[in-house]
Amino acid sequence: MKKLDRNGRHPVRLTLNGMPEEGFAEPRMLLTDFLRHEVGATGTHVACEHGVCGACTVRIDGKAVRACLMLAVQADGAEIETIEGLAEADGSFGPLQQAFHENFALQCGFCTPGFLMSLSEYLEKNPDPTVEEIKVALSGNLCRCTGYHEIINAGLDAAKALRERRQQTD
Amino acid sequence: MKPAPFDYVRAECLEDAVAVLAEHGDEARILAGGQSLMPMLNMRLVRPEVLVDIGGLPDLARIEDESETVAIGAAVTQGGLADWPDLTSALPVVAAALPHVGHFQTRNRGTVCGSLCHADPSSELPLCLALLEGEVELHSARGVRTVPADDFQRGVLTTAKEPDEVAVRARLPKARDGERFAFLEFQHRHGDFAVVAVAAKRSGDSVSLAVGGVADRPEVCHWDALPGDAVDDALNDLAWALGGSDDIHATARHRRQLVRHLGRQAIEATAAGGAGA
Ligand SMILES: Cc1cc2nc3c(=O)[nH]c(=O)nc-3n(C[C@@H](O)[C@H](O)[C@H](O)COP(=O)(O)OP(=O)(O)OC[C@H]3O[C@@H](n4cnc5c(N)ncnc54)[C@H](O)[C@@H]3O)c2cc1C
Ligand code: FES
Ligand code: FES
């Protein structure tokens, strides 16, 4: 059993969007701060820091979770996906980003990384959601600008685009 | 806000966790899914000296289908239980309640046992534990004991668990032939804690109703027989007996009215055969 001392900075190694990353963290460092300040991946946003808003959503070993409710040391060895990994290899928008762009599903954009990371897991589990299902799935992400209507439409469009892409590759 | 400093132990086995708690007592805290503890740490409502992470323990990540009960290990997440293929047949009321526990992102990490240990009076899973008369198995350096639901949750965020004890698994009795269940809750937004949540069970003539969000813990009421024309009076008595109070989410009066309405709907749903909404 390994005890990490509160005053020490402990190595954390993880895979971020397919690339190995490493840095150091005190036990109390949140994963959000580790990603933003240690690794420099500032796409993951932080607002409430107590689990309510969903701005900090990332995927850990495939699951969408709130990075502000995880310690960096807990993510040692994990595979993490963040908003920085959603674009295509050539840097153009991925299907989720494209759908948000086309539907005007963002204004200030602060909440957007969280919505996209939530949808990226959700649409894998439920590729053809109803409006009602999308609303429930996105109820854990708050947006203070858009009024959600466009975000829901973007979610439905993204689902369709992802289904079509899957058909082409199947 | 950021947590105050603490030492962090990633338990490699249950014995590790028990040993750390034996050494540090109430200076130490178990970290399971972190979906309630991390917000409290971030807001510095709690300042433990040591955190013991049991989230990764494979031995505790098992759902065991025993003959009469289902044993849910301390590392089983709410999402993991929701995905268990036998859930709807074995524990229909839990299957109906789980989608109301936070959001899929919080269920991805939050554990079933963590919710029971956190003991929020409006939480859905403690309500199910109470209705089903389940039990919680507690381990410490002093030994192992099993606490029935009615003794486990004592009040707001308070349980029978001592600071040196780990909840290792919760046992929930499986639905028996002829039993019917329903679950309903009123919340202001999807994924919020319930203002009032009810879970009902019918077996032959007898009816049980568990109510969360009103008293300081989920309370269960049993009736050996509850004919349709007696339901309103029974629920009115229950609504007053629970003694809810006013807070920013609802008034006591609103809560009593919700007990009457949701209670009736849930009891009727069990008569109609529904497994819950
Ligand atoms: C946005 C949001 C919405 C939510 N909505 C709801 C909701 O609608 N309904 C609801 O019920 N909950 C809700 N929750 C809380 C729920 O998600 C938590 O998962 C649950 O309350 C605690 O489980 P956990 O595994 O996350 O425990 P943790 O947060 O890790 O621990 C909670 C407490 O229990 C103790 N503990 C945990 N496991 C054990 C164990 N095995 N043995 C001994 N002690 C233990 C910890 O020391 C701590 O004191 C919400 C949370 C968030 C962030
Ligand atoms: S910053 Fe994590 S949920 Fe708000
Ligand atoms: S676009 Fe501004 S918060 Fe959502």
Image: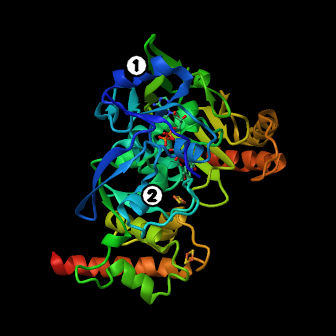
Q: Residues within 10 Å of mark 1 (few under 14, many from 20)?
A: some
Q: Amino acid at mark 1?
A: Ala
Q: Residues within 10 Å of mark 2 (few under 14, many from 20)?
A: many
Q: Is residue A23 visible?
A: yes
The subunit carrying tag 2 is: A
Residue at position x 53%, y 39% from top?
B125
In the picture, measured across the screen, residue B160 lies left or right of residue B57, that is right
Residue designated by label 2: A32
Q: Amino acid at mark 2?
A: Thr
Residue B223: image x %, image y %? 67, 29
Q: Residue B98's mark?
A: none
User: Relative to the observer, which residue lies in front, B70 or B74?
Assistant: B74
Residue A101: image x %, image y %? 43, 86
| Snapshot quadrant of residue B157 | top right
Residue at position x 46%, y 70% from top?
A115
User: Relative to the observer, which residue lies in front, B243 or A20?
Assistant: A20
Residue A88 higher or lower than B267, as above or below: below
| Snapshot quadrant of residue A65 | bottom left
Residue B54 higher or lower than B42, as above or below: above
Residue A44: image x %, image y %? 44, 66
Q: Is mark 2 within 8 Å of ligand 2?
A: yes
Residue designated by label 1: B19
**Helix, strand or loop for disc 2:** helix
